[in-house]
Image (cartoon, grey):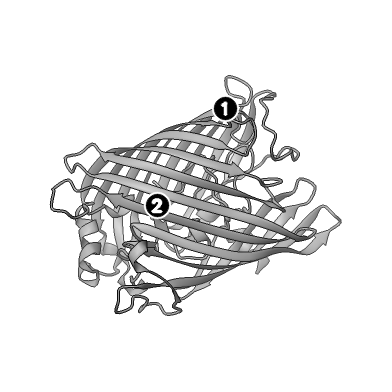
Amino acid sequence: MLALLLLLAAPFQTAGPLPPPVDSTDVALVEAVVPPAPRARVEIADEPEGDIEFRPRVAPSALYSPNRGLGIGAGVGIRNVGWPGSDLTADVRLQQHYQSADVSFFTADPLRATTHGLLTVGASTTDRRRYYGLGPGTLRDSEIFLDHDAAEAEARFGAYPLGTTALYVQPSVRLLYDRSNGINDALGGGTLADLDEASREALVVADGTRTGASLGLELATDRRDWAPYPRSGMVAAIEHRRFVAFDDSDLTLARYGVSAVGYVPVRGRTVLVFRGIGLVTRSGDADGDGQDDPIPYYYLPTLDARVATAYRPDRLTGRDVLAAGAGIRAPVFDFLGVYGIDVLAMGYLGNAYDNVFEQFTPRVSFENGGVVGDDGSAALRPSLALGLGLVNLDKETVVLGGLLGVGPDGVTLASLRIAYDLRDARALFR
């Protein structure tokens, strides 16, 4: 089982990005580089140094994906480009049903420097973007494959105004381009008739080309003792974004988000882990009919393996998302005090909602369907994640690993990422 996970899964990341920053997508890259020694969690100091340094980046998960097929993913990272402390990365992913390219440039290490900037551009294309519809009651059997192209460019500025990780502030502006080519009938799957009216409408309004800008402000606090492999502390963040369309749709969106992950030490490397995330998305009323405008599906948040590990890719999409989880990370084997193997077990409850304030109920459903009651309330969907990770004990860093997710929708293989960090090169949600 361990060999299978190490070969097929992306890196097992239990604590957000390693310094320097890494990709935050479900194809997290493995870099051939030794991370720096641990530092105090509340100390931030500008101490860049060093010559230009090249490093290869590989994406093991690109070798095969049940949804995206066979392929390869690789890139290069260059530190100290132009001045000490900067970091440039370029990555390409080529698979049967998915291709992407991304370039990111940090002016300084976001986990070390008191201030830093980020410029990133990326583009992707897929003829097999899964879509099950919107809201909490979607069925796995209604799966549709969509043809979708996307591109985006983003500029951010990050700062620690108190000089410590107790407060992190990051304004950003993001330009978005999307082109939806509709359903890819050649791949089979369901039809529009399998979806409810709201889910069909989200496809209709997405058809064609759309452009827009998303402006955001994010605040975070990071009290982990050591971000790459925490044994205590927490990281929490709140976000607000506003989207304005450049096309003739006059679409406007507002999104509010909150997330947190905490680590409670038990003994040695054994820790209890707690995770929570909530998102609320609302649109304007451009046509003045008193109803929120329909939102293209690709602007909506999705509860899947990137957010809460064990959920299937692209599975649960809605205006609102809510998920919480708890688990334990514990060592099971050490080799000469140099490398060790950790096991992680996490249980999650969550769902995607049309309106979380009206539909949420503490009820839990283990069925694939039937989660929406007669009163419109929607039960939480459970999932269980079981993972293994190879740990470099000297550097306190997880080297490789992955997990199996088990839930009412079946079994999925995914990379493990408990803590999403606002300082990642790629945003978790658009």
Task: Give amino acid for label 2.
Answer: Tyr
| Neighbourhood count class around disc 2 (C-alpha, 10 Å): few under 14, some 14–19, many 20 upward | many
Residue 36 image offset from top left, x and y in percent: 72, 37
**Mark 1 element type:** strand
Residue that label 2 marks: 98
**Mark 2 element type:** strand
Residue at the image position 64 percent from the left and 58 percent from the top: 401
Q: Left of 283 or right of it: where is 64? A: right
Which of discs 2 and 1 lies nearer the camera? The answer is 1
Marks 2,1: beta carbons within 8 A: no
Find the distance from the CA under tag 2 to the CA under tag 1: 35 Å
Determine the image quadrant of residue 68. Answer: bottom left
Q: Tell me if I can see residue 280 in this picture.
A: yes
Residue that label 1 marks: 115
Task: Give amino acid for label 1.
Answer: Thr
| Neighbourhood count class around disc 1 (C-alpha, 10 Å): few under 14, some 14–19, many 20 upward | many
Q: Look at the image and tell me in which quarter the N terminus lies.
A: bottom right
Q: Left of 337 or right of it: where is 102? A: left
Q: Tell me if I can see residue 96 in this picture.
A: no
Q: Left of 41 or right of it: where is 72? A: left
Determine the image quadrant of residue 340. Answer: bottom right
Please name whichever residue, 362 or 394, is drawn nearer the observer in this view of the structure: 362
Residue at the image position 57 percent from the left and 52 percent from the top: 419
Residue 205 image offset from top left, x and y in percent: 20, 52
Number of numbered discs visible in the structure rendering: 2
Residue 142 image offset from top left, x and y in percent: 30, 71
